[in-house]
Image (tube, rainbow, N blue to C red):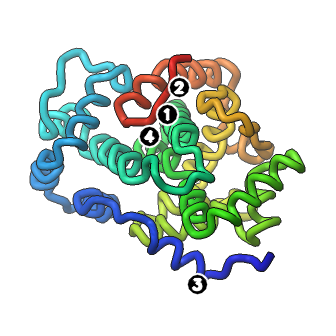
Amino acid sequence: MNPLTSKEISEAVLRLPSLPHIVMELIDALDNGDVDTNTLAQKISHDQAITAKVLGLANSSFYGMQSKVGSIPHAVTVLGFNSVRSLVTAAAVVDTFSEGQPKELNYAEFWKHAIATALAAKAIARSRGGNEDQAFIGGLLHNIGRLVLATYSPSRYQEVLKWRSQHDEDLVVAEIHVLGIDHKVAGREILAHWKFPASIVETLHPLTENKLNEYSLIASVVTVADAIAYGLDLSGGAQDRVPVISQHEWDVLKLDQQTLFEIFSTTERQFKEACMILGANAGDG
């Protein structure tokens, strides 16, 4: 099969649903320090579905608040605007890309893994003094390119899954073999289309010793969080496998055994509740 071209990937991105306007405004504000948070909080409040999910997370074990958070402006006050923005983005993305699209992608498994990765990434960033909200969003969106590939050509993506199963290989290897590109490349295309800042887009770039920059920490956080989420088997996917993490990634994060155990525990503790609130089916296990 011929590899997918840049034009085909761009066409695939354009076929995907658009994010709600308020989310696009919040994304635009990621790199804008001079933003009217009060006005944006009021706009978020107008979307009842998103508001319900954000308040659900704000009042869950995700934050462990001592008193009930009753409104978006209140959430901004007690959690901070950046945290509320990451929760709104999570709620909107999961809601926008739900069941009913390509059958080649199991949406329950897809979102369970994405949420587990986001939770693990946030916990890792907290332990390392990194930006927890960037890590959370990066973790949630780290596989978003799979939506692009599966939507553009369901039949070819079925070939990817078939080849991976036959050869017991990582998904990225199967995608490159069948499609000529992997979901990280497609993911960068859609995040750029949505105008996410470089701090998020860069989390989808493979990190090497020769490619260290200001985003290296969050990129490593998301990579390791992805492996942790697979290792904990929270998505329940029959074909899931833990990817190999380079020694360089571990060296960047310097996570000791005790810290890793705490990250595992936090991720597992928060997982089911987060899935329930965001609308991903966490199952009964």
Q: Pointer 1: what residue?
A: 119
Q: CA distance from mark 2 to mark 4?
A: 14 Å
Q: Is residue 195 left or right of residue 201?
A: left
The residue type indicated by label 1 comes to: Leu
Foreground residue among 262 and 253: 262
Q: Crowding near pointer 3: few (<14 within 10 Å), some, many (20+)? A: few
Marks 1 and 4 close (CB-CB < 8 Å): no
The residue type indicated by label 4 comes to: Glu
Element at label 1: helix
Q: Is residue 239 left or right of residue 45?
A: right
Q: Pointer 3: what residue?
A: 7
Residue sitting farthest toward the right: 167
Q: Quadrant of residue 9?
A: bottom right
Marks 1 and 2 close (CB-CB < 8 Å): yes
Q: Name which residue lies at 74% across and 39% down.
A: 239
The residue type indicated by label 2 comes to: Thr
Ranked by sequence position, the earlier of labels 1 and 4 is 1
Q: Name which residue lies at 60% across and 54% down.
A: 216
Q: Pointer 4: what residue?
A: 132
Element at label 3: helix
Q: Pointer 2: what residue?
A: 267
> Which quadrant of the figure contains the C terminus?
top right
